[in-house]
Amino acid sequence: MKWLRISTALTGIAAFGFVLAQVAPHAREAGALFAAQDDPAALSELKLDALLKQNDRLVQDQIETALAAGDADLADSFVALARDRNIALPDDLLNRVSDAVKDQNSTSYFAKRFATGLVTGTADDVASLSGTVAGDLFVIGDIRDVVREGKHLAMGEDTDHLVLGLATAGLAVTAVTYVSVGGAAPVRAGLTLVKDARKVGRLGEGLAVWAGRSAREVIDGPMLQNAVAKGSVFRPGETVSAIKAAFRVEKAGALVRLGKDVTRVAEKTGTRGAMDTLRIAEGPKDVARAARLAEAQGGKTRAIMKLLGRGALLLVGGMFDLALWLFGAALTLFGLLSSIKAMTERLTQAWCDRRRARRLRRAQAAAEAALANAAATA
């Protein structure tokens, strides 16, 4: 029975040790992810490690896809990621990416896209954003948007309150920009990007709901309707003054912070990187996380967000699975330690029982020898 109990403990040690060896790598990864959940840069690195191990051609395939879609900026971002990760790429592919980037940065292309942004107020790259921001800084773009959406509001038609609020906020920030000699320009550019993302349908649903609610809070509806009724693109001075009066500066803090964070992303990743962020963000906290990620990862950020989506910013989904790995590892470790404890106790008990039996045998032998001597003497 004694040896059966020892064998059982040995079996437990072997079984729990084997299971722990299988569970430990997953638990270690889960623990690292939990520890990095508040650091987008570290979190994205851990997730990239796991993703790239599954497919060694993933980066090359993504570059081919980006080039086929005419997105040289994204392709170049994947090249930067490959360089950082020491992933070898074919020379002909690198040359194609380089040529595409040169074409995109050419003077003729920039002039064409600048004009498009200036006239239409829509941006999807650096050049068109420059044109859009130029139009908004000269108040033409924002007046156009406020007058259009404001008239929809006055007539009871469908109104994009988010575009209306952002354009109104933009006019107020533009005035500050002029006064501060460009000091508020980053906020101005960020608000323009959010507005453009809304126009082209690239603003995440959660962020759109939050921004729309915030935009409503910064506008005095009746006063704005009165300003729009009298406003015109051809009388910018009068129109801006009237619209600014309908803007509640004290409630614009959240929108201003959003504009700053969007600009921080754009400065490191480009306009399309900022647009990608606005598309996956579910709220202003996501955009703030993306700004931290962009400042840490630079040109690689677009590639990272393309591969990981919103998962590059925070732990989304799989939280229960991660917790199960940690719980399983803890439970297995507890079983292993318990088996070791039981084994130690049973071996110790067996050793003590053996010593006790040996002493008893010696004592019995001594007693029998004494009796024999006593009998012989008698």
Image (cartoon, helix red, strand yellow):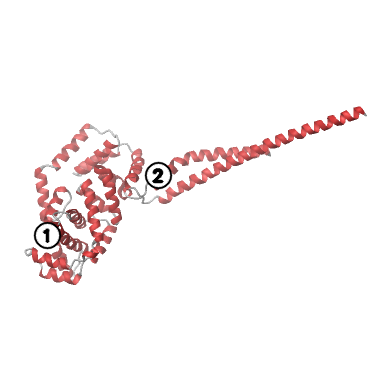
Q: Check the image and name the residue furthest to the right.
A: 378
Q: Give the residue type that dot 2 points to.
A: Ala
Residue 356, compared with residue 286, is above or below; it is above
Question: Cα distance, mark 2 to mark 1?
Answer: 49 Å
**Which picture quadrant has residue 300?**
top left
Residue at numbered disc 1:
139
Crowding around mark 1 (Cα neighbors within 10 Å: few <14, some 14 to 19, many 20+) is many
Mark 2: secondary structure: helix
Mark 1: secondary structure: loop
Is residue 269 shown left or right of residue 39?
Answer: left
Residue at numbered disc 2:
32
Q: Give the residue type that dot 1 points to.
A: Val
Residue under the point 12% across and 64% down: 240
Crowding around mark 2 (Cα neighbors within 10 Å: few <14, some 14 to 19, many 20+) is some
Residue 169 x %, y % = 19, 61
Residue 207 x %, y % = 27, 58
Quarter in which the C terminus is drawn: top right
Quarter in which the N terminus is drawn: top right
**Which picture quadrant has residue 159?**
bottom left
Residue 232 visible from this viewpoint: no
Q: Earlier in the sequence, mark 2 or mark 1?
A: 2
Residue 201 x %, y % = 22, 56
Q: Check the image and name the residue furthest to the top.
A: 376
